[in-house]
Image (cartoon, grey):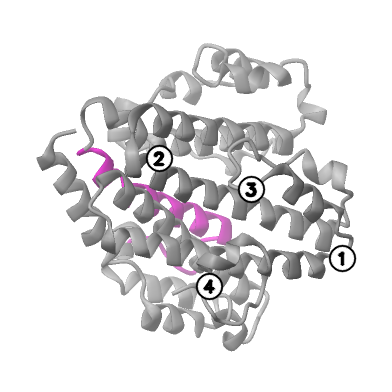
Amino acid sequence: MSFGSSNVIITKSKAIYSTTLKEKELLQLSEKKSLPEFILGLKALPQFAETLGNIPEQIIRRAQLEDLLKKISYRQVLKIVKFAEGKYRPFYFQKIMLLEIDYLLALFRHFIAQDEDSFKPIDDIPVFVQQHASLPFKALAEVKDFETLKTILLTTRYASVIKPFLTNAISDFPYTELEQAFYVFQYRDIFHHIQSLFSGSEKKNLMMMYQTKLDLENLSKIYRLKKFYHADPAAIKKVLFIEFSRVKMGFWDEILAIKDAEDVLTAFHSSNFSTIKDENDYVFIEFDIDKIKYNLAKRFLYFSTSAAEVFSAFTILEEIEQINLTNIIEGIRYNLDSKKIQRMLIY
């Protein structure tokens, strides 16, 4: 990629990040008492006004709002992606893959739930994505039945994902397993591009960034499945992805063998992840994980001179903004005190 293009990606990433929600704005939003009041608060902010401005806040549902916020996040990232060029383009286009996967999962949920309101049409996909994506969006938009959807996917790069599910009927379709399969496919694609396109310290840093992100997500799954579902180690192991883990399999076996979810936290804090966490007291395991990702990403965003590293850091920080907004929405939904909501926010 040219020097000029790299500079644009770095500049754009930092510029767009400067418009993301800061502490004051997050705290103000967390004080809202209802979803319409929260939406009005978002409308007052320039980065949300364009998308939410004409939407009546009294009738929008929580799921619709979360979907709109996700689309705003995608559009922010796509403003940067369009400047990627040359052999590095596939790495930057990983966000388009994520948008494609979200679209496909929404299609599957639509057919499984048989809910006309559970899916939005092709018009919701940005033109830039339609021009550069690998999916036949127009054909997918016209799909009327579940079997046709699976057949079309066999002609795309996601064929290996859908093949194990070809014989599953809609009535007993294992959606969670499909979601996991897409998750694994996504990470393998990212690591493939890092290993094939980059070298030296840049490759090392990108591997570390994504490996840490992946390992922390695995830890979160273990904690939640033990705490809320009392899942056994064998069941949990099936949903982990440790192919590119920074730590040895023995670490995961030790974590999986822990019976009490709270003891997972103790093992977590004494692990090698402690070298990149801050000194704050932790509230939830998800807070732990997002705070570590936040601190790591901010370090690369501010100090790296690599476009790929800065872009990757930006996408992680954008993801954390979505988590913050979701936590506020959920807090409002369950009438949580604003102080409790604020303890879950990352900034």
- Disc on res. 148: none
Q: Nearer the viewer, residue 174 or 288?
A: 288
SS type, badge 4: helix
Q: Is residue 184 above or below residue 335?
A: above
Q: Amino acid at mark 3?
A: Val
Magenta residues span 54-83
Query: Which one is earlier in the sequence, the residue at label 2 or at label 3?
Result: 2
Q: CA distance from mark 4 to mark 3?
A: 42 Å
Residue 146 image point, x, y percent: 66, 22
Look at mark 2 in the image and give the residue it sits on. 95
Crowding at label 1, few (<14), some or many (≥20) Cα neighbours within 10 Å?
few
**Residue furthest left as drawn:** 4
- Label 1 with label 3: CB-CB less than 8 Å: no
Q: Is residue 81 magenta?
A: yes
Three-letter code, disc 1: Asp
Mark-to-mark CA distance, 1 and 2: 36 Å
Mark 3, other Cα within 10 Å: few <14 / some 14–19 / many ≥20: some
Question: Residue 176: percent from the left, percent from the top?
Answer: 72, 39
State the separation of the CA atoms marked 2 and 3. Answer: 26 Å
Query: Which residue lies under the disc numbered 3?
Result: 247
Instruction: Give the residue at mark 4.
Output: 35
